Image (cartoon, helix red, strand yellow):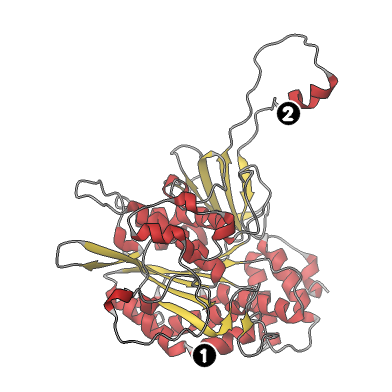
Amino acid sequence: MNIITVSLSSPANHVTAQLFNAQESHLPYTKSAPRFHDYSAFLSTTKNKNGTTNYAPRALVYDLNGGFGGAPKYEVDPSTISNVEVINTAPRVPKHAFQSNLDSGIDNAQLLSVSNTKYWTDYNKLIYKPSSCVSLQDWDSGTPYGTNRNFPRLKFDTYSVGWEEYKKCQETSIDEFRKYLEECDLLQGVSMFSEYNSGWGGFSSHLLLDLKDEFFNNGANNKHNIWVYGLAKDHGRMDINQKCSSIASFVELAHHSSLFFPIRPTCESQILAPGFDSTSEWHQSSLTSLLVNSLWELQSRKQSPSHMAEFEDNLTRGSNRNIVGEMCLKAKVSQKSQSKDFGVLDVPQDQIWDLMNSVSLAKEPAYLDMGLSNSSHEFSRAIVQEKPGETSQKNAYTASFSAITKGSTFPPTVNGSSFVSEFAITSGIAATLKENRKFLLRIKHNENLTDRDELIEDISAMIEDYKHGYDDSDEEFDI
């Protein structure tokens, strides 16, 4: 069963690049290689006349102008072209040394570092179809939000700006998605990745709405699995327009998806390696890709796959609750060696702290929070474990985590073994929704809110779905 991926924004493209690199690691390069995965789950296949097969991500990829780095949309050998004048309209980003080596069949990941992996194309391994890569030509990358090419003071930071930009490539986007849909033998679902604290929220919300209206609201396609992984990138303090945009994007993406994963990794955990750099998109995206790849492994394995519909049904349980507000990664982190000897020892005062730091007590598995909320009451929870029997949880799955962590392009960002990923729908997300409603009630008008009152009603309906027990604060709308 096939899955179509839609990736919007540079942070999202970093995540999906690492996910597709993990898929590439499953491909057999010899006839005798064992096959444990359905390669067509996430990849498009093309049979060649010589009997070989080409694989490419089944994905639509969107980025700002310049966001594709040194990867040209079309690979052209200059030696095959004559009598053609080449006009350079802007300086080109040089191709990364890792990619140049990869073209020669050399996978040298030692060439990758925090300082030279600004673009996701610096380390992606699979070649994307040219028609699936969409660059927003009016907006330049290179700043936190992106800026307008003609009006540098205008940022790609709000819902309304993203919506207006989407209108320019609306028809093309639908046509390209239709091509992928027609290639699918049997569609398992759609996975959308998008930053939502910027203009990408408005862009992706309206793309999602169009895809639903065009392809998934009639006949046999009425039951659909559309999962949205919303990346809550921290741009620092948001102004009123940006805050309104973030809220509107959150509500729209949650409303039009069948499962919504708002992902916001913390940067403090024993799981994180000492060299983890929170300012690096390459490093940051590795955490999200490790979490999501546990689901991709379930969906693409050849024997006993757990498809999107099954996993979704086990979480939603027939309710309207589709926001997976609590997510985390757990791992067993090796502790420092512990002394088994007992005795009295004279230790110089200046060495006491070194001795104390060399001894540690056994601890619970390390924990990395990836979601927006935590709550004592959970409606449902699903666990993906690396080893069977790690947990007694009923809704538990088993999948490999090493497929991505042992990949050559995965950065050294995590410690530990026996990884576990957890996904839960809890009442905790109601607190986030209440804060958003409180904020909107204080705003009279904003260009990013098409209908403020309708948005408040939508949030109030969501709160009712996630409430547990009586809460007298609701009577006053938390004012």
* Position in image of residue 306 (x %, y %): 38, 55
Answer whether residue 305 is visible to the viewer in this image. Answer: no
Return the mark for residue 167: 1
Report the side of 68 relative to 343 (left or right).
left
Q: Nearer the viewer, mark 2 or mark 1?
A: 2
The kind of residue on which mark 2 rests is Asn
Q: Quadrant of the C terminus?
A: bottom right
Quarter-of-image position of residue 354: top right
Identify whether 337 is placed above or below 169: above
Identify whether 381 is placed above or below 240: above
- Read off the residue under disc 2: 357
Report the side of 333 relative to 3 (left or right).
right
* Position in image of residue 112 (x %, y %): 51, 54
The kind of residue on which mark 1 rests is Lys
Q: Are marks 2 and 1 in contact (CB under 8 Å)?
A: no
261 and 201: which one is in front?
Answer: 201
Report the side of 192 relative to 141 (left or right).
left
45 and 68: which one is in front?
Answer: 68
Q: Residue at x 50, y 75 (%)?
A: 92
Return the mark for residue 250: none
Report the side of 477 relative to 410 (left or right).
right
